[in-house]
Image (cartoon, helix red, strand yellow):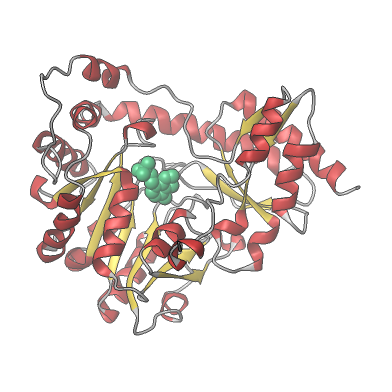
Amino acid sequence: MLISKRIQNTKLSAIRKLTPFAKKTKAKGIKVYHMNIGQPDIETPNEYFEALKHYKTKVLGYENSEGIDELRESFSKFLEIHDIHYSPEEILITTGGSEGLLFSFLTICDEGDEIVVPEPYYSNYNTIANSCGVKLVPFETKIENGFHIENRESILKVITNKTRGILYSNPSNPTGVVYSLKELEMIAEVALEENLYIISDEVYRELVYDNIKYKSIFSIDKIHNHLILIDSLSKRYSVCGSRIGMFATKNEKLRNEVLKLCQARLSISSVEQYAATKLLKLPMSYIYDVRDMYQERRDAICNILKDIEGVSYYKPEGAFYLIVSLPVKNSEDFCKWLLTDFNINNETVMFAPADGFYFDNPQGNSQIRISYCISIENIKKAMHILKEGLKVYNSL
Ligand SMILES: Cc1ncc(COP(=O)(O)O)c(C=O)c1O
């Protein structure tokens, strides 16, 4: 029996591939600080659990394939706060942002088509693209420019007659870059000129630091028919396990096609959708308090990294990740070694090697992606392990 080439050609998740080593390390009684994965440690708001507790029904049935009306309405109202205007009918509820991305690829691309993306990018974009027979084509951004998009030409250079869309996350996982309106205008112009879709993944929208004014590409009216907006509650409310996300577009034809995929998977979980409506109604102060907490963590990690010899990084402007260049040739080997051969007082740290966030670019070989979803106290301990680990590793 055969396995499809699409899946055989897909790599294991860059974020999780060292997990078997971490498991063995933990089995030896060594504590591992997880800075490899974007799993917030912040408590899920109690309103969510209360809503689950109060959900009453005699039969737990399927819901509408589009998502329950209350949740579509709540999303629509929530987006208005950010000056993003989608009616409930223009919103389809999905199993996390992940399913919205999958449905986008399946609907706008045929096998062999291409989607362009600023590199480095969220590594699961590659997995999703491969599983749809779609080729992800990166355009370069550089650590020394804070991973900002340099110019229109850098995007145009990689566009071919097979390109169907431009995809990015804003703020970005893995770089923490927040694109300026000027950069979004570049993307919009290219999409209009080349007749492409834009997939704007805004799952970290509210996590923007230093009083930077966030603008969604939605603010550029003329691209509305080209635009797919992906959103999710996972990170914003620390409910990664609830799997509630959305796909929105003003393009009715496209939406009707995506609906076929929604109908094929019948419905997403019912109880979780009801509870999610409560989260979207929380005051914005909840989200901004969470943002401030992440900003403090970002400041803490950058303050330590700046004093580690041979390390370079760009201070992230949003989300809760950063790409760090290390004085090592092979960051995957170093990350593995930290788990298998190094600890301080029975504690070590796990990072994601950055090569999985690049298509095929040697830049990633000496970089890691750090997720700072842990407390400042633990960040300090983990960064100490990194600093001492680099010294020992480079003297072997
Ligand atoms: C950039 C980006 N997009 C989408 C997702 C998907 O998240 P979920 O499916 O939990 O909404 C993630 C998760 O880490 C992400 O980092």
Residue beneath the point at 27% across and 80% down? 193
- Could one spot residue 386 in this view of the protein? no
- State the residue at coordinates (69%, 37%): 304
Q: Residue at x 49, y 71 (%)?
A: 139
Residue 197, above or below 153: above
- How many labels, in total? 0
**Residue at coordinates 19% horizontally, 40% vertically from top-left?**
75
The vertical placement of 27 against 332, above or below, is above
Rendered view: 355 above or below 372:
below
Task: Return the residue found at the far bottom.
Answer: 161
Report x, y in % for residue 186. 36, 71
Horizontal side, residue 230 vs residue 28: left or right: left
Q: Residue furthest right?
A: 395
**Residue 261 in sight from this viewpoint:** yes
Which quadrant holds residue 3? bottom left
Q: Nearer the viewer, residue 343 or 132?
A: 132
**Residue 181, quarter of picture:** bottom left
Residue 99 position (above or below residue 36): below
Q: Position of residue 7 (x, y in %)?
A: 45, 61
In the displayed structure image, the side of residue 365 where residue 51 appears, left or right = left
> Residue 135: horizontal and vertical position, in percent?
42, 71
In the shown orientation, is residue 37 left or right of residue 58?
right
